[in-house]
Image: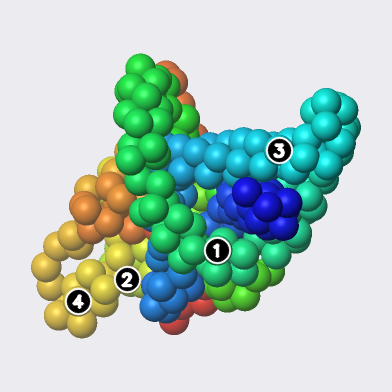
């Protein structure tokens, strides 16, 4: 084989190694949130890139095979070229030249370029990567079988690692998505508050008992109406005897019905009691399911120590709410 042909083969093999090395960096470093956004928008490159990212066994096998075939082909052809040119000293010359050449042009340079343009590089490079993977399919399959066997041994640990994500990581992704223009600031704020809501307990949104506005059960209907109007609340706890003995919740709608008819009994809503350390996220869903708007909070001994409302909890998500009563 001519020296010119050997030189062309060496350069082509080095380019192949550089391409696979760069693809690996691009697909690992690409912003998955941006790729998902582009995939949903119909970008075929983003869809294909995500399919490779979600199948790391096949993807890494393709990269490993392509990179090593490129390096071996480059080394073999360049060594043959050096032997033709320098005789027995060609092996030494090839070794001295190949090590920095493969390291710089086959690894460092392509990885740096593909890392800098990771998102674009991932979307563009997956198409030639797919073609080359098809050409090298038999060899890649052998490595994939071995990779899958190893992955199966670590599957339980891998699943756990894939499914676990800390709140800090989720908040970081939300912040990054807003900066990238993928979501609006209001969406990010609402999602961040919803995540933080999971850590809150009833004690964190509680109005202490001494600050709770209540009305005694013994007063007349007109006094009820005056109290509701004076305090500007749509609901008030009703106590019997002592303030710690809450017997129900009176809504202004029920009081208005009785006052308008000038007859009938006041209907008190059954109070919903929760412990101090009850998760607020669960309180929210239970209040929604039971159709109640107020929860009475008890301590470990069963003593009433405060209350919270559905509005108080929702305000943690969307901010201050002004209704027609308060």
In percent of the image, x 20 and y 62: which residue is there? 266
Mark 3 vs mark 4: in front: 3
Looking at marks 3 and 1 on the same chain, the residue that comes earlier in the sequence is marked by: 3
Task: Answer above or below: position of 261 versus 203.
Answer: below
Task: Answer above or below: position of 186 versus 90.
Answer: below
Dot 1 and dot 2 residues touching (CB under 8 Å) = no
Assess disc 1: are there few (<14), some (14-19) or many (≥20) residues with their C-alpha within 10 Å of its C-alpha: some
Determine whether the residue tagged by mark 2 lies in a helix, strand or loop. Answer: helix
Q: Which residue is mark 4?
A: 257
Q: Which residue is mark 2?
A: 252
- Asked whether the viewer can see residue 246, the reply is no
- Asked whether the viewer can see residue 70, the reply is yes
Assess disc 3: are there few (<14), some (14-19) or many (≥20) residues with their C-alpha within 10 Å of its C-alpha: many
Q: Nearer the viewer, residue 78 or 113?
A: 78
Distance between the alpha carbons at the discs numbered 2 and 4 = 9 Å
**Residue 254 spot, x, y in % from top left:** 23, 69
In percent of the image, x 75 and y 43: which residue is there? 81
Q: Nearer the viewer, residue 205 or 33?
A: 33
Distance between the alpha carbons at the discs numbered 1 and 4 = 71 Å
């Amino acid at each position: 084989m001519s020296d010119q042909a050997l030189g062309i083969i060496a350069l082509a093999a080095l380019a192949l190694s550089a391409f696979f090395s760069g693809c690996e960096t691009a697909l690992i470093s690409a912003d998955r949130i941006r790729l998902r956004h582009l995939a949903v928008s119909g970008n075929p490159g983003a869809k294909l890139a995500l399919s490779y990212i979600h199948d790391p066994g096949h993807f890494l096998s393709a990269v490993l095979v392509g990179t090593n075939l490129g390096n071996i082909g480059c080394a073999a052809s360049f060594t043959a070229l050096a032997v033709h040119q320098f005789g027995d000293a060609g092996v030494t010359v090839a070794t001295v030249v190949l090590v920095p050449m493969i390291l710089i042009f086959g690894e460092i340079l392509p990885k740096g370029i593909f890392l800098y343009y990771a998102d674009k590089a991932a979307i563009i490079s997956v198409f030639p990567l797919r073609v080359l993977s098809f050409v090298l399919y038999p060899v890649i399959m052998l490595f994939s079988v071995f990779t899958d066997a190893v992955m199966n041994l670590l599957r339980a640990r891998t699943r756990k690692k894939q499914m676990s994500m800390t709140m800090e990581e989720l908040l970081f992704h939300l912040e990054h998505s807003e900066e990238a223009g993928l979501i609006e600031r209001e969406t990010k704020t609402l999602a961040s508050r919803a995540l933080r809501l999971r850590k809150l307990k009833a004690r964190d949104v509680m109005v202490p008992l001494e600050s709770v506005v209540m009305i005694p059960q013994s007063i007349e209907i007109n006094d009820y109406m005056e109290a509701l109007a004076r305090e500007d609340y749509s609901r008030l706890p009703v106590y019997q005897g002592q303030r710690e003995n809450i017997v129900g919740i009176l809504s202004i709608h029920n009081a208005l019905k009785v006052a308008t008819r000038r007859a009938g009994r006041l209907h008190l809503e059954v109070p919903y009691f929760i412990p101090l350390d009850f998760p607020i996220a669960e309180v929210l869903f239970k209040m929604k399911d039971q159709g109640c708007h107020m929860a009475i909070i008890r301590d470990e001994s069963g003593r009433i120590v405060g209350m919270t409302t559905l509005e108080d909890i929702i305000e943690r998500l969307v901010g201050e709410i002004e209704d027609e009563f308060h």
